[in-house]
């Protein structure tokens, strides 16, 4: 097999993310375009693979009636990074430097989670100074570090001391924060840093950090302790910001704010996992699986996140497709 045929076959395998109908109609065109740009390369570049994957995701969203999600993602990414930065400031001061260190402490921090919080603050600064690709790389790197901490928290709990109801919202926020806008306006560039500074000022005004009496993060599960209060305030702040964005863009008949609100429903619910645990049927399902209260809260949160992150968008997409079908515009949601 020639090198061109091998490269074409590699690009053909990367088209798995696209809907089957789209591949049947435009596979040859896509492959020829990438082959022409590939030059003397023997295998697809990482950027080509990412571009093809994201293109496939966009086409699947369009086919599901959710094409607007892509337009709303940059707004959601800015707001989730701002929320992650605020949580990082609070947790760094309250639980990573103001509580007794565990045997797994890292430098001045009580646990490995302190490194993640520093990562989000550095990402916020990067988004202000070097928006676009550098900010996305910084967010992806911090999310990767968070994934490592998550694995350690599962496999060797003392190394991170992070229960599921803390990890879940951090992961939800981090995954969305990667989609930083390429050419944001100055308000968007400064929003994460401004939120972190405002959180720091709020802590200073209220008399300094209120640390847990024993090991950090271990409270569960009445929603009244310092961790629960911090997550609750973050959820309310994110929801209010999302509603303001939806209203602001809606005044100009721009649907991006509404799509961002749909996307942000998932991290808001993840932040409220401790309260979701009191709702049925989440509580009964979680209670029937394991005996550990923190894990039960995490399972209840995962179920709620599945509802807002999967079932709710599918429902919205169905409504959009029906509305467009009635207007005779169904072709805009079908992959070409």
Image (cartoon, grey):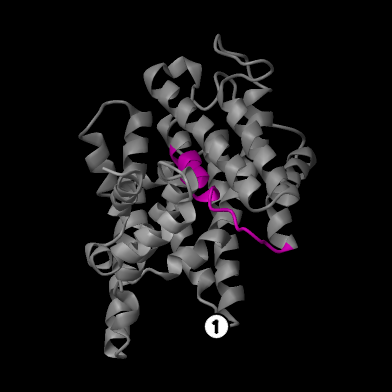
Establish if 108 lies above or below 291. above
For the residue labelled by badge 1, is the local secondary structure a helix, a strand or a loop? loop
Label 1 neighbour load within 10 Å: few <14, some 14-19, many 20+: few
* Residue at the disc numbered 1: 253
Q: Residue furthest bottom?
A: 327
Q: Which residues are magenta?
A: 168-185
Q: Where does residue 314 sit, x and y in percent of width and height?
A: 29, 64
| Residue, far left | 288
Could you say which is closer to the camera, residue 286 or residue 145? 145
- Residue 325 x, y percent position in the rendering: 27, 85
Can you say which quadrant of the picture contains the C terminus?
bottom left
Q: Is residue 318 above or below residue 271?
A: below
Q: Is 55 covered by the magenta stretch?
A: no
| Residue at x-position 29% and y-position 82% | 330
Left or right of 69 on screen, residue 194: right
Q: Is residue 10 left or right of residue 143?
A: left
């Amino acid at each position: 097999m020639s090198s061109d045929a091998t490269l074409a076959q590699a690009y053909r395998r990367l088209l798995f993310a696209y809907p089957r109908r789209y591949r049947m109609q435009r596979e040859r065109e896509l492959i020829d375009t990438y082959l022409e740009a590939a030059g003397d390369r023997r295998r697809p570049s990482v950027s080509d693979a990412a571009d093809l994957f994201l293109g496939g995701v966009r086409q699947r969203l369009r086919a599901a009636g959710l094409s607007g999600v892509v337009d709303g993602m940059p707004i959601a990414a800015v707001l989730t990074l701002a929320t992650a930065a605020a949580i990082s400031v609070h947790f760094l001061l309250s639980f990573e430097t103001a509580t007794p260190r565990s045997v797994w402490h890292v430098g001045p921090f009580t646990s490995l989670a302190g490194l993640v919080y520093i990562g989000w603050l550095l990402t916020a600064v990067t988004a202000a100074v070097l928006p676009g690709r550098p900010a996305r790389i910084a967010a992806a790197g911090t999310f990767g570090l968070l994934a490592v901490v998550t694995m350690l928290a599962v496999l060797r709990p003392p190394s991170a001391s992070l229960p599921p109801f803390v990890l879940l919202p951090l992961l939800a926020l981090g995954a969305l924060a990667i989609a930083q806008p390429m050419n944001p306006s100055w308000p968007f560039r400064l929003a994460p840093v401004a939120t972190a500074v405002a959180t720091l000022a709020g802590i200073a005004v209220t008399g300094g950090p209120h640390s847990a009496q024993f090991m950090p993060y271990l409270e569960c599960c009445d929603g009244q302790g310092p961790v629960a209060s911090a997550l609750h305030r973050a959820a309310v702040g994110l929801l209010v910001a999302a509603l303001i964005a939806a209203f602001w863009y809606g005044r100009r008949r721009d649907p991006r704010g509404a799509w961002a609100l749909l996307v942000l429903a998932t991290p808001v619910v993840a932040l409220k996992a401790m309260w979701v645990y009191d709702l049925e049927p989440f509580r009964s399902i979680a209670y029937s699986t394991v005996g550990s209260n923190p894990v039960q809260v995490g399972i209840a949160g995962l179920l709620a996140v599945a509802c807002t992150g999967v079932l709710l968008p599918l429902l919205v997409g169905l409504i959009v497709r029906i509305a467009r079908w009635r207007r005779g515009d169904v072709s805009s949601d079908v992959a070409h």
